[in-house]
Amino acid sequence: MANSSSDYRFDLKSSFLGAQMLFVAFGALVLVPILTGLDPNVALFTAGIGTLIFQVTTRGKVPVFLASSFAFIAPISIGVQKWGIASTMSGLIAAGVMYILLSFLIRWKGSAVIEKVLPPVVTGPVIMVIGLILSPVAVKMATGVVNPAAIIPRGTALTVSMAALGTTILVSLLGRGMLKLIPILCGILVGYIAALFYGLVDFTPVREAAWIAIPHFTAPTWNTSAIFFIIPVAIAPAIEHFGDVLAIGGITGKDYLKDPGIENTMLGDGLATCFASFLGGPPNTTYSEVTGAVALTGVRNAGVMTWAAITAILLAFVGKLGALLSTIPTPVMGGIMLLLFGAIMVVGLNALVKSGEDLLEARNLTIVALILVFGIGGMSISAGQFTLQGIGLAGILGVTLNLILPKERVAKE
């Protein structure tokens, strides 16, 4: 991986910085598996290996860390409940394959082809659907009514969830230095302490867990419905990938779109996601938190991310860590989710605003309106045993409308 132009150095001096980078990413990394029913230890392992795969693919030139993607929370949650983890993984593998195919398309036609097929007028509302479709889940989690068999008193649940939410907001607004980069971790910690005060935490799983344990890897099984349900969700992260690569390039002063090339960064992302899905882990994506840490610390050495990856892999085999994470009460996560799912929606809205498109123009209005209504309103299309609905339907509809609807030829006066 090392070469003279990449600033890649793998030495012991970088090990502490690597552990620090993982600490920055840790809260978000384990949040996705906790919310979706996957194993946090598997997520740690696949994030570590995925980052190493990315580094090999990009020749150690880009200092980023790959871990659990928030964009897939909704489809994974729905898929696990409907088909189980193994079947859901087949859909996630398909998402990784889509990234790989996009990388070859970019290699062939250039990056402009992605903007043509997936403009903000499509990706923006699809991202909004992801956040909005999850909002009822966040409210139920925050108020303690997710599990009817173990309903937490509403006042207690709200106290705990608001403690987590308030801390996350305050740290993100008022935090300084490294603290500002870990608002989710701070929110979980304060919410957990509040939950301890109310007696909501059961440490039995921690006492029974072994110190060293193999993560609960899950092999995928083929499920056509899961594949077509999840593939459209990959649209949004694919576009976000460009933004993340541009952001880290702006911080380091290098043009990663040209060297190692966006086609290689996308390929690395796709291979990492496929690998994670083959073992039962969430899809990987570049982490903005770590990008912020790079800006704060001035790190330009991608070898630091190698140490972060190795640390994640080692932690994956600490059985008591996974058991401890499983004891986090639902209201704690619900408080974080109230902000997170709303933030996902705002990211989509911001993509529309920044595009500068006139959303009242007939073509744009049609695309945005139908994506939102079909995605959020519960519309479904069935063919035999196959059903397309929610985020998947919204994504495919948006891409199709963008390709077939004619653009105005004459500007309005």
Image (spheres, helix red, strand yellow):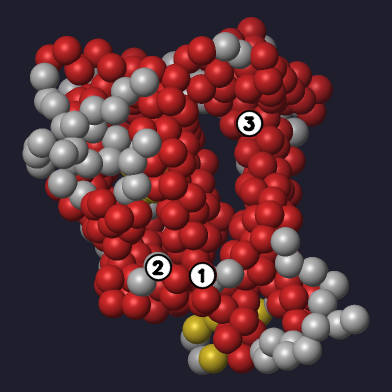
Q: Quadrant of the N terminus?
A: top left
In depth, the one of 3 and 46 nearer the eye is 3
Q: Secondary structure at mark 1?
A: helix
Seen at 41% across and 73% down, the residue is 227
Viewer-nearest residue: 45 or 25: 25
**Labels 2 and 1 touching (C-beta < 8 A):** yes
Q: Amino acid at mark 3?
A: Ile
Query: Which residue occupies the extreme right position in the image?
Result: 413
Disc 2 to disc 3, how far (Cα)?
35 Å
| Disc 2 residue type (three-letter) | Ser
Residue 94, given in percent of the width and then of the height, sits at: 34, 69
Residue named by callout 1: 115
* Image coordinates for residue 254, horizontal then vertical, percent: 33, 41
From the image, tell me which residue sits under label 3.
336
For label 3, the SS is helix
In the picture provided, is 169 more to the left or to the right than 209?
right
The residue pinned by badge 2 equals: 111
Identify whether 102 is placed above or below 322.
Answer: below
Task: Give the percent coordinates (x, y) of residue 81.
Answer: 51, 58
